[in-house]
Image (cartoon, grey):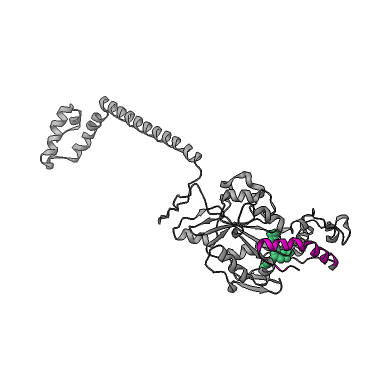
Amino acid sequence: MPGPKACKKTRKEWHLTHWSKLQFPVILLQIDDWFKCLDGLMEILISKKVVLALIILAAISFYISYTFNTCLVSSIAKALPKWRHHPVVPNDTPIIHYHTSVRVVPLLESNESDISPKYKFFREQGLRPMRQLPSALIIGVKKGGTRALLEFIRIHPDVRAAGSEVHFFDKNYPRGFQWYRQRMPPTLEGQLTIEKTPSYFITKEAPRRVQHMNPSTKLLVVVRDPVTRAISDYTQAISKKPDMKPFDQLVFINSTIGCIVDTSWGPVKLGLYSRYLSRWLKYFPLSQFLFISGERLVVDPAIELKRVQDFLGLKRVVSERHFYFNSTKGFPCLFKSEGHSTPHCLGKTKGRNHPYIDPIVIQRLRDFYRPFNNRFYQMTGINFGWA
Ligand SMILES: Nc1ncnc2c1ncn2[C@@H]1O[C@H](COP(=O)(O)OS(=O)(=O)O)[C@@H](OP(=O)(O)O)[C@H]1O
């Protein structure tokens, strides 16, 4: 049995005594013996050479990890500005759906603002809607029934419309066509984009500008008896400015009832349809216009919608079954539409009560408009029957 001095032997001796004991009969090995020899083992491990080797090893591994991280950070930094300078995904970038727990969100262009069911449907089908410039415009006339027409035609599954008036061809033209296109809803191939801004009809530059966008643009004009149109226009104006003078004072020069009609007053001037139309006809053939009767749109919307669908080359989808007459409102309303799944009418700014106007004033206005109306009937080939 080795005594306490056994492990104070030289390393050579230790190898001789203990390694030989490991390789040969284990019986010879005594637990006591091993405890005492641990000291010897430690002595070897903490010898100077081992410590030096460990320091070198640590230094090498630190250098490798530092170099790797620096390269990684610099390559990310190089890539970042590219994302910043190209914020818009081209329109033909496919929308990818991954069925994993990670939600993939289109990084650069978001169509999330358009939450209409038609749009959601496209996305669910993996289709790629794109924004297009309108191929049809409701250009007028103000207070003719343009909102009703837009809301009725957009029930059609192949029609998508800009919700609010964009005023591109009158006020926003300097912003450019790219800006205009971005205001349009996304559509699929075969779907038609439509926009309505009634002031286009009376804007001098609009015909040339629309032609510049697309000479085959289809133009829809909802017209209404210019006398009731003028009263409707006045009703809207006084609702915003209650201290306005009465209609019969504004409609005549010098406020003298029955005297000369003031054609410089907006509500009167806008009813001179033939004048405005002749401007448009310098840029577009008559075949590119569809004139819709504002009166018939109230009495029988389905008939007018049939004409509109035919003119736009659409399947006849919108029909009688989409409308009901709301006797409280006094106007046709919709059972459902793009934005509502329940029956609803147009807003309360549509179908306002008109103020009482002296019948003499009305007759005077009718006489005034007659020659202009006849001219308009001749130009369009349609007798709208305004008395
Ligand atoms: N279904 C239905 N519901 C409500 N109102 C209807 C409808 N169909 C046509 N109209 C008539 O539309 C008139 C408003 O015309 P616009 O939408 O062209 O007005 S605007 O120029 O956009 O302000 C509006 O004019 P007012 O009656 O003077 O308010 C209505 O007569």
Residue at 61 percent across and 54 percent down: it is 284
Whether residue 207 is in magenta: the answer is: no
- Foreground pick, 83 / 39: 83
Q: Position of residue 58 (x, y in %)?
A: 32, 30
Residue at 74 percent across and 58 percent down: it is 272
Instruction: Identify whether 272 is placed above or below 323.
Output: above
Q: Position of residue 158 (x, y in %)?
A: 52, 62
Instruction: Identify whether 79 is placed above or below 232.
Output: above
**Where's ligand 1: which quadrant?**
bottom right
Find the residue positioned furthest to the left: 24
Q: Is residue 155 visible?
A: no
Of the 4 image quadrants, the one containing the C terminus is bottom right
Q: Position of residue 2 (x, y in %)?
A: 15, 34
- Foreground pick, 133 / 18: 133
Q: Which residues are magenta?
A: 360-387
State whether the magenta stretch is mostly helix, strand or loop: helix
Whether residue 374 is in magenta: the answer is: yes
Q: How many marks?
A: 0
Residue at 15 percent across and 28 percent down: it is 13
Left-right relation of 172 to 24: right
Q: Position of residue 317 (x, y in %)?
A: 54, 69
Q: Is residue 250 visible?
A: yes
Residue 292 position by quadrant:
bottom right
Left-right relation of 68 to 319: left
Left-right relation of 29 to 304: left
Of the 4 image quadrants, the one containing the N terminus is top left
